[in-house]
Amino acid sequence: MDVKFSVSAKAESETRVAVKARNFIMYVDEPPQLGGQDKGANPVEYVLAALAGCLNVVSHLVAKEMNIKIEDLTIDIQGALNPAKFQGKSNQDRAGYKQIDVLIKVKSDADQETLSKWLKVVEDRCPVSDNLANPTPLKLSLQKL
């Protein structure tokens, strides 16, 4: 059975948008060097944050299933992209991240082999990493107000 998630967004300026997810409001903005007022993380930072959040949940879920005790977990994520594509200055690179690198630091009583198996399951079951690693159909439509 599929579970649907949704958000609704309202533009507050050319760079800032208020996004409502359930009972939460997230502000998405650009830093000053990209024309924004830095009132929130930018869209591509939210992509990395979504990945970190998903990896955290799935890491703990899978650890519990595998009887692995996690004492501490830190997730460091970075990615590089060329903003020239979305700014309309170049068609050389893709608009998105060229690669996303994730470093999961875990303090656990499990041995390295067990943690390697755990990581493989986590990567396989994380919905956000799945969406980033595999093509997901995207359909944009328009309604004139």
Image: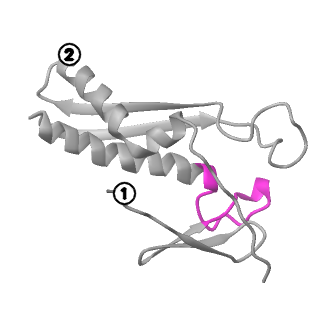
Residue 116 screen position, x and y as percent: 26, 21
Please report contact status of discs 1 and 2: CB closer than 8 Å, yes or no: no
Q: Which mark is residue 113?
A: 2
Q: Quadrant of residue 51?
A: top left
Q: Which mark is residue 78?
A: none
Q: Nearer the viewer, residue 21 or 34?
A: 21
Q: Residues within 10 Å of mark 2 (few under 14, many from 20)?
A: few
Look at 32% across and 45% down and name the residue there.
Answer: 56
Residue 114 screen position, x and y as percent: 18, 21
Q: What stretch is highlighted in magenta?
A: 28-44
| Residue at the extreme left | 67
Look at 38% across and 50% down and name the residue there.
Answer: 53
Q: Which of the marked residues, 1 or 2, is nearer the chain's N terminus?
A: 1
| Residue at the extreme bottom | 145
What amino acid type is highlighted by mark number 1? Answer: Asp
Q: Is the magenta stretch mostly helix, strand or loop?
A: loop
Where's the N terminus, which quadrant? bottom left
Q: Which residue is identified by label 1?
A: 2
Q: Is residue 36 magenta?
A: yes
Q: Measured along the vertical axis of the image, is residue 24 above or below residue 52?
A: below
Residue 117 screen position, x and y as percent: 24, 22
- Between the residue at mark 1 and the residue at mark 2, the CA separation in whole angstroms equals 33 Å
State left or right for residue 83 relative to residue 119: right
What amino acid type is highlighted by mark number 2? Answer: Glu
